[in-house]
């Protein structure tokens, strides 16, 4: 019984970590509620150490300029779809990555520079390279340039 309570508590903490930032990613008819990684430390940690994440939730890392953003799966507890997105909202790369069980952990780089990195549960992201997403902030405005 105590183990069950501990698991419930850890899942509650994971859900609390996915604080309601109000940001959404619209991708192929799917809507993801995302937490924004703002600081360098939040970006470095990503979803590391979290035990679980609700379906259709994720973490969005926002960078000031397009760049090659490496990702690793050190201390991850579950597999992820990692999506690199350009400033225009185009998926420039997508990789499904498994938690790292070796030392050192491999580093994964996108095929081209990106402005955003989205992490969601593996198998949940519905688009492919070249497809477009929409990133909506809490006020309903797009974070992407209008065309």
Image (spheres, rainbow, N blue to C red):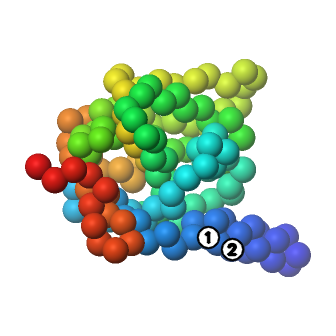
Horizontal and vertical percent position of residue 65: 40, 35
Q: Which residue, as the protein is rendered here, is positioned at the far right? A: 2
Q: Which residue, as the protein is rendered here, is positioned at the far front? A: 64
Checking the image for residue 102, the label placed there is none
Label 1 close to label 2 by CB (< 8 Å): yes
The residue indicated by pointer 1 is: 15
140 vs 60: above or below:
below
Q: Nearer the viewer, residue 90 or 13?
A: 90
Q: CA distance from mark 1 to mark 2?
A: 5 Å
For residue 128, say whether it is visible.
no
Q: Quadrant of the N terminus?
A: bottom right
Q: Secondary structure at mark 1?
A: helix
51 vs 138: above or below:
above
Q: Hey, which quadrant is residue 113 in on the image?
A: top left
Say left or right for 96 vs 2. Answer: left
Residue drawn at x 64%, y 72% as measured from the top left: 16
Q: Nearer the viewer, residue 124 or 41?
A: 41
Few, some or many residues within 10 Å of mark 1 (<14, 14–19, 20+): some
Few, some or many residues within 10 Å of mark 2 (<14, 14–19, 20+): some
Residue drawn at x 58%, y 24% as measured from the top left: 107
Number of numbered tags placed on the structure image: 2
The residue indicated by pointer 2 is: 12
Horizontal and vertical percent position of residue 92: 30, 33
């Amino acid at each position: 019984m105590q183990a069950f309570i501990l698991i419930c508590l850890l899942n509650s903490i994971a859900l609390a970590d996915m604080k309601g930032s109000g940001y959404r990613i619209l991708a192929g008819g799917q809507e993801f509620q995302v937490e924004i990684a703002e600081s360098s430390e939040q970006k470095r940690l990503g979803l590391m150490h979290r035990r679980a994440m609700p379906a259709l939730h994720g973490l969005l890392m926002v960078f000031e300029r397009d760049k090659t953003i490496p990702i690793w799966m050190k201390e991850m507890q579950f597999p992820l779809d990692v999506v690199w997105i350009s400033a225009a909202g185009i998926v420039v790369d997508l990789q499904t990555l498994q938690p790292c069980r070796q030392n050192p952990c491999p580093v994964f780089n996108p095929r081209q520079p990106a402005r955003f990195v989205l992490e969601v549960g593996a198998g949940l992201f519905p688009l492919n390279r070249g497809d477009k997403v929409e990133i909506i902030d809490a006020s309903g405005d797009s974070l992407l340039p209008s065309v």
